[in-house]
Amino acid sequence: MSESGIWELCGETAKANLKIAPADIDGSPEGWSVTKTTMKAGLSAGVEVIEVNNGFQSLFILPTRGMGLWKIQSGEVRVGWDSPVKHPVHPAFVDLKSRNKLGWLDGFNELVTRCGLTSNGPPGIDETAGAIESDLTLHGRIANLPATSVTLQLVETDGETEIVVRGTVSEATLFGQHLELVSEYRTVLNSNEVTITDCVTNRSGRGAELQLLYHINIGSPILEKGSIWHAPLKRLTPRDARATEELDTYSTYREPTTGYAEEAFFCKPITDSDGFTPVLLTNASQTEAVSLDFDTTSLPCLTIWKNTQSLADGYCTGLEPGTNYPNFKAQERREGRVVKLAAGASWKTSMKLSLLTDSNKISSKLDQIAELQTQAELQVDRNLVKGISGDQ
């Protein structure tokens, strides 16, 4: 088998529930499946979930929520977090302008959530934008826009079989921007990795602005007291006054703490020879970890969000590569961190998420990060920095 046919998972003629297994594709290897279900209850009614089981782990993709990745499950190990929002929420139940334009939080519970495409960061009035797009809500619209089509294909590359799920989401309005996201998830059979490749195209006849940040949230069991995040960095800057309070422990995590106030750090990463930066979150004993490798040519900014409040209130951390830091869009535009797309032009990025449960592989990743760090001495800003920190 070199390449299978294309299966429609979501679209005008797709079934509400279906399962595709090796028996459905001639010459396919055994041990995998792709299952599409449509949820029925409560705020999840109508949400489509695609479970991609590659034999080692299962990915749970949410076409209804901007092609977000709900969670990864491998045996007893879950990569994701426990939001107070327990189940995927259909966008029809999310009013982005509610709660002082923070309504986006009412549907926030994924492992990978895209923030964009026109804007991300806090809400407010963008005075330089046209009237139809000046009133910005938290983190934009894309996570609450359903995919118009999703397909499945099996591809054989270099003797390995990959499951490929590809979805298209449109963020468009009359007299405003028209951006199209094509998102692709690829995972090799029996692997511990998933590669996410996104392409955003400006379908308008005029220029457009793009902001995109990936909110990659991880909670227990990998996040715990004593967990550490590792990345090769040139510079680390506190987002706000709250973040300056804990600069001495920026890389470590507390136990779940009731009343904990979130903090965030803005980072300038060091890249490898291919233009990628590795980030690693380890548990306290360094026996389990999540690895993220992202393309810094398209995602030059890295934000680390620490939200170690109680388990009931959403204990997690965010590893957040982006085109920008999640400040208000006007500030990011002023600092040159808003992507400009000519009519018909495209922007593309790629990243790889890996679940590591082998101490030797974790050590190898730590060695890679340490080697990259020798390229530059880390500059830790002790105070807020104009042009980087928020509202400076």
Image: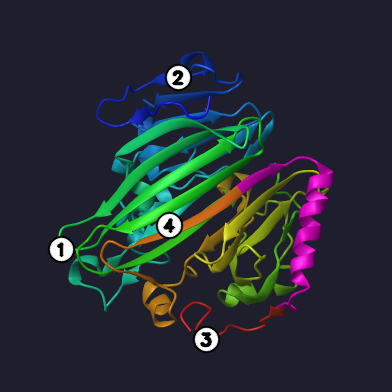
User: Residue 175 shows which numbered tag?
Assistant: 1
Q: Is residue 358 magenta?
A: yes
Mark 3–mark 4 contact, CB under 8 Å? no
| Residue at left offset 54%, top offset 69% | 300
Which amino acid type is shown beneath numbered disc 3? Lys
Please give the residue where the numbered disc 2 appears in the rendered image.
19
Q: What element carries label 4?
A: strand
Mark 3–mark 1 contact, CB under 8 Å? no
Q: How crowded is mark 2: few (under 14 residues within 10 Å), some or many (20 or more)?
A: some
Asked if residue 386 lies left or right of residue 291, the reply is left
User: Residue 115 shows which numbered tag?
Assistant: 4
User: Residue 386 shows which numbered tag?
Assistant: 3
Give the image location of residue 370, x and y in percent.
Answer: 79, 65
Is the residue 378 above or below the residue 76 in the image? below
Is the residue 380 above or below the residue 195 in the image? below
Magenta part of the chain: 353-378
Q: Residues within 10 Å of mark 1 (few under 14, many from 20)?
A: few
Q: Is residue 203 visible?
A: yes
